[in-house]
Image (spheres, rainbow, N blue to C red):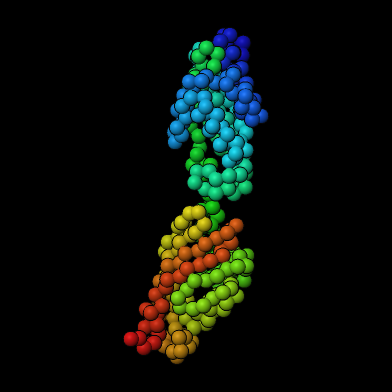
């Protein structure tokens, strides 16, 4: 600090005043550190003027209950300040097009502030907004859950599905009526017995905010009566496109479009 001149020391003190006001939610203090004609160069945000900035702060408080922890503060010349701040909060309201999750979040921002006449008049910021979005998005969690569903079915661990499906699970499949996980497990077991199948996962991707799409190819062998047909010993394969809807990390609904007709043809079911 001793190597800095008076104006540089005042600039650093100005930022500390800003951060104290930011963390306490004291919006009445903000006009004492930020100019009325303040310009914020922040990618993805349109902030021009003090009123616009205050509105953005209110939105951040409401959405994230935001706080900042100073990790680095340096003077750049006579009129600029460099900061590196760790931002933390709780996702309390819709943000970045995503509904509130209640999750704790943390990301970093690096900023340059320009000072004129004792007030901040300009800012340039680079935030890890992608990292923030990943923290509040359900995509990663939902993908992991559906991946576990596929793994459990492939490894014939049907009891593992109990922890992956919600109690209100409903299956929308034109080939059968299935109103519970227990019914679905019975259908899968019947397919094990008749077709001795394995699952090949072809594609798995999110359909925000609460769905996952899965494309799979089944490979098996007709070893026991199935679709009313005596076992043929033939190798069989068929594809399925499935959409899973999740709530709180549990599968609660599924839609299935499988090549049932193709499978029936392979096991010898007469078709029109």
Outermost residue toward the left?
272
Q: Please tell me in which quadrant of the rendered image residue 202 appears.
A: bottom left
The structure residue drawn at horizontal position 38% and vertical position 79%, both measured from the top left corner, is 261
Foreground residue, 92 or 166? 92
Res 185 seen here: no
The structure residue drawn at horizontal position 54% and vertical position 32%, both measured from the top left corner, is 55
Q: Is residue 197 left or right of residue 158?
A: left
Foreground residue, 165 or 35? 35
Res 36 seen here: yes
Residue 265 vs 38, above or below: the answer is below
The structure residue drawn at horizontal position 60% and vertical position 75%, both measured from the top left corner, is 182
- Number of callouts in the render? 0
Outermost residue toward the bottom?
230
Residue 32 vs 215, above or below: the answer is above
Image coords of residue 18 (percent x, y): 60, 23
Image coords of residue 272 (percent x, y): 33, 86
Outermost residue toward the right?
24
Q: Please tell me in which quadrant of the rendered image residue 43 appears.
A: top left
The structure residue drawn at horizontal position 61% and vertical position 65%, both measured from the top left corner, is 166
Outermost residue toward the top?
6
Image coords of residue 127 (percent x, y): 50, 34
Q: Quadrant of the N terminus?
A: top right
Foreground residue, 186 or 169? 169
Residue 74 vs 94, above or below: the answer is above
Image coords of residue 193 (percent x, y): 52, 82
């Amino acid at each position: 600090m001793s190597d800095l001149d008076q104006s540089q020391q005042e600039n650093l003190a100005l930022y500390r005043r800003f951060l104290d006001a930011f963390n306490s939610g004291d919006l009445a203090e903000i006009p004492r550190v930020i100019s009325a004609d303040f310009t914020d160069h922040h990618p993805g945000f349109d902030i021009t003027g003090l009123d616009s900035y205050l509105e953005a702060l209110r939105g951040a408080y409401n959405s994230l209950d935001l706080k900042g922890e100073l990790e680095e503060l340096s003077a750049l010349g006579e009129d600029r300040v460099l900061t590196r701040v760790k931002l933390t909060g709780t996702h309390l309201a819709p943000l970045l097009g995503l509904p509130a999750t209640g999750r704790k979040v943390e990301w970093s921002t690096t900023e340059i502030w320009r000072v004129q006449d004792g007030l901040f008049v300009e800012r340039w910021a680079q935030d890890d907004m992608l990292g923030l979005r990943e923290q509040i998005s359900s995509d990663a969690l939902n993908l992991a859950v559906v991946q576990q569903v596929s793994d459990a079915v492939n490894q014939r661990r049907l009891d593992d599905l109990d922890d992956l499906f919600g109690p209100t699970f409903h299956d929308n499949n034109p080939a059968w009526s299935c109103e519970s996980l227990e019914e679905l497990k019975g259908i899968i077991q019947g397919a094990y017995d008749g077709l001795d199948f394995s699952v090949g996962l072809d594609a798995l991707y999110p359909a925000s905010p609460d769905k996952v799409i899965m494309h799979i190819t089944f490979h098996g062998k007709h070893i026991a009566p199935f679709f009313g047909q005596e076992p043929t010993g033939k190798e069989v394969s068929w594809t399925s496109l499935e959409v899973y809807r999740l709530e709180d990390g549990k599968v609660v609904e599924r839609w299935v479009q499988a090549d049932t007709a193709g499978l029936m043809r392979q096991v010898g079911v007469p078709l029109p």
